[in-house]
Image (cartoon, coloured by chain):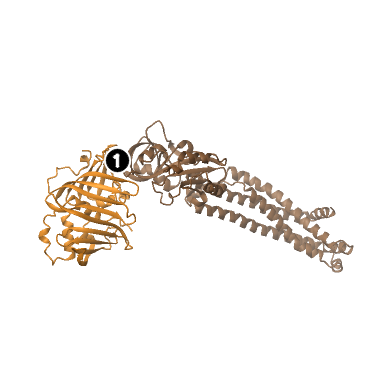
Chain colours: A brown, B orange
Amino acid sequence: MIVLRLGWRNLWRNPRRSLITISAVGCGYAILIVLIGLTVGIAGQMLKNGTGLLMGDLQLHHSGYLPERSLYDTIGSDEDSALEGVLHQLSLYPQLVGRSPRVYGFGLLSTGEHSAGARLMGVDPQVEVRVSSFLSGLQAGALDDSVERSLLLGDVLARELEATIGSQVAIVTQAADGSLGNDLFLVSGILHTGLSYLDRSLAVLYLEDLQELLALGPDEVHEIAVRLEDPMDADGFAAQLNASEELPANISARSWGELAPQLKDYVSLAQGMYGFIILIIGLFTAMGVLNTMMMAVFERSREIGLVLALGMRPLLIVSAILLESLFLGILGLIGGFGLGAWGMSYLTTQGLDLSRWMGELSMLGTRIDPVLKASWGWDYVLWSALGLLLATLLAAFFPAVKAARLNPVQALSAPVEG
Amino acid sequence: MSRIGSGSKGIWILLFLMGGSIGSLSAQVDSPQLSPAEIIDKVDQMLRGDSSQGRVEMAVVTRRWKRNVMMEIWSEGTDKALIKVLQPKKEAGMTTLKVGSDMWNYLPKIDRTIRIPTSMMMASWMGSHFTNDDLVKESRLIRDYDIEIVYEGDREGVEVYEFLLTPHPKAPVVWGKMLYQVRKKDLMPIRAEYYDENEELKRTLTFSEYREMGGRLVPTKSRMVPQDKPEEYTEMIYHELRFDIPIPQGTFSLSSLRR
């Protein structure tokens, strides 16, 4: 116990120096918290936009569907993979937030004057909104079940067709039976996702309408998109589904990491960056602490020599110095946490508004919000605290050992500190 | 890269099926001093009559489905054609109009006429193994290709010419080369092979059932087989053909699509 007291008291023998060191540790930690917060925030936002807008956390397809996306490779095309059964099986998993069956096609859209090719997507809006957000970000209107054959268009596509809400659009497509599927649709909403390839090419229809247009059965879909509580569970859940006996063998599940490897790479890169940031800032903090403790030992070499001469065990001296440094670190961390938390409280709510400089921006096929919002990465905050503590201890270790090895005679003959 | 169009061949095939001034052909067969390009030009020209009208059955067989479409076809010169679906009922009245390099589809179910945009030119025409572009491209072989005879003689008991067609550097065609086999005695086409830029065979068109129709000898059946799906094909079978008949004014106009 005496060591504890010794360490604590020693800390305050030069309060100014200690405070400076404490604030260095604190500032380092606060910067770490904010940087980690921003990185976690951006990665989270990218993941959320990347998977949240349209993709979902995982997707189920007929095993032959990707990468060609053939019209014929549907879930529900044979008895083994009945759609109802698959949907029911999925809903039994508690970690699942939503699942949405989808049909895709490619068609020619025409308003008479203007024609354009478009990617057709058939969804049930009721369940789709639980999986993705693109339907909630409508610029105007919505899929409307009170009219026959309602249609949503991407805003750029709508402009190209010179279609507005209320316009009639003819869709022509190659149907599954070889015939030319064609029908008239009523534009009842305009989509804006911020991703130009979608805004330029996406046309959203009711699931049943698209199935009819493509001459597909009502139980045939190309994809089931799934939303999970935590996107980080997607890999495990996909593996679980693929191994499951309950799901038909010709259906395969893919996580967002498999569907969008570039997104996965980015998230891993961001995680790698936390480690790097912690390392750099830890290094600087450690140097500050090293300097302080060297000074302390140097100043006290006379008294250390004295207590050594009086028979104090060197181990005790080492412990006292390490404890002093530990107190330094802990106080710094507490202060730093306060400072960082204060910064985070701003960055998590207000965010860093970069819209003045970047406007609408997308990266890796994902929209980036111009307002960067931080979010707490608690594990990283904890790990960096431990890292900083370790750094301060390591920095104190060298001076401590040096102190314990002092030759009492030499130390005592050194000049008295001023 | 911008070699749009699945080849000038398509319209050739189609217009060929639509008939042409084939009758004048036999007279020219015995002119051995013709150059390869001249022979091909004759074949090419005989495929394009002043006008023609006919009924053709299109049979499309794919891995997933098989269907037969009966169509009536009118053509005038090299650049005007109207193709109207008679059967099946579900699609009866669907009409394709081609004028020059433009193409429209009329869809009776929704009573709309849709112009096919450039971006859709490579899409399948009426679910067949022909593309929209095959119908639209009306370039002449001798204009777009260098032509040489690579074989002359007996093939399976028939005296034939075999032509190698290599596109001019800037010709707007997608094919890297074409092999074309023509019967020597009457210049009836036997087969055409289409190769991509990597000299890989992409599809083969074979002609058969040469018969008198509309007073001329024509191959009444042709079959297009894509190389990557050898079990699939599209067959065009002529049931009726008339040549150089007067075609009413306004047949090749948008307003005639609905009729």
Instruction: Specify whether A309 is left or right of B84.
Output: right
Residue B161 at x, y percent in the picture = 19, 64
Category of crowding for the residue at label 1, using alpha-carbon neighbours closer than 10 angstroms: few (below 14), some (14–19), many (at least 20) = some
Q: How many marks?
A: 1
**Percent position of residue B60, x then y:** 28, 48
User: What residue sits 28% from the left and 37% below the top?
Assistant: B109
Residue located farthest toward the left when viewing the structure as drawn: B27
Towards the viewer: A5 or B238: B238
Indicate the position of residue B123 as horizontal and vertical percent values: 32, 49
Name the residue tied to disc 1.
A112
Above-or-below relation of A409 to A147: below
Q: Is residue B130 visible?
A: no
Q: Secondary structure at mark 1?
A: loop
Q: Residue furthest top?
A: A146
Tell me the subunit letter for badge 1.
A
Of the residues shown, which amino acid type is indicated by label 1?
Gly
Residue A301 appears in the figure: yes
x and y percentages locating residue A59 in the rendered image: 49, 46
